[in-house]
Amino acid sequence: MPDKQDLEERTLLEWEAPERLYVKRGKTYFKNLFTLLGVLAAVAIFFKEFLLAGVLASFGFLQWALNSSTPKITKYLVTNRGIRMHGHDYEWEHLKEFWFAEHAGQNVLHVDTKATFPGRLYLLLGRVSKEEITDVLRNHLPYQQQAKEDLMEKISVEVSRRFPLE
């Protein structure tokens, strides 16, 4: 029989931060992005790949829409049962490991999940320190010193480095 103490949810760490990364993009970025996507969509249409052209147009619209609105501030909670963010609970038994990385000048906590979707949780740190989070999460999840990059992330970083849009 579990202890009564284990049944009660206790907050171990709580902080507020933006719900997603936000980098303000200028007109040059969007001019270059839409030019590139337009050329790729024209090539796709030439080869009668209308679905691909639609996906490219959707990607351009998504980039513009995300840049047009600033992210809301959300509350992140780490409890004795798991992590709560954006109104969803992720229990410890469904999480695998965690590490930190820096994106767009902001520290981000990455937590891999055992589920297919979402396969990874991204939590912006805001004003809480890496050490505070590490002290709490190490009791429940393994800590990875090196950031894990999958093939798509490596390709994305390399393409962004070689073809800057700004």
Image (spheres, grey):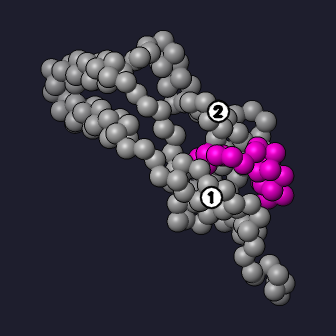
Residue 76: give its label.
Answer: 1
Q: Position of residue 83 (x, y in %)?
A: 66, 61
Q: How many marks?
A: 2
**Magenta stretch encompasses residue 132:** yes
Tell me whether circle 1 and circle 2 mark residues in contact (CB < 8 Å).
no
Chain part drawn in magenta: 121-142
Q: Position of residue 62 (x, y in %)?
A: 33, 39
Quadrant for the N terminus, please: bottom right
The image quarter in which residue 44 lies: top left
- Mark found first going from the N terminus, 1 or 2: 1
The image quarter in which residue 107 lies: top right
SS at mark 2 in the image: strand
Question: As shown in the figure, which amino acid type bears the numbered disc 1?
Answer: Tyr
Taking the image as drawn, is residue 92 in sight?
no
Quadrant for the C terminus, please: top left
Q: CA distance from mark 1 to mark 2?
A: 18 Å
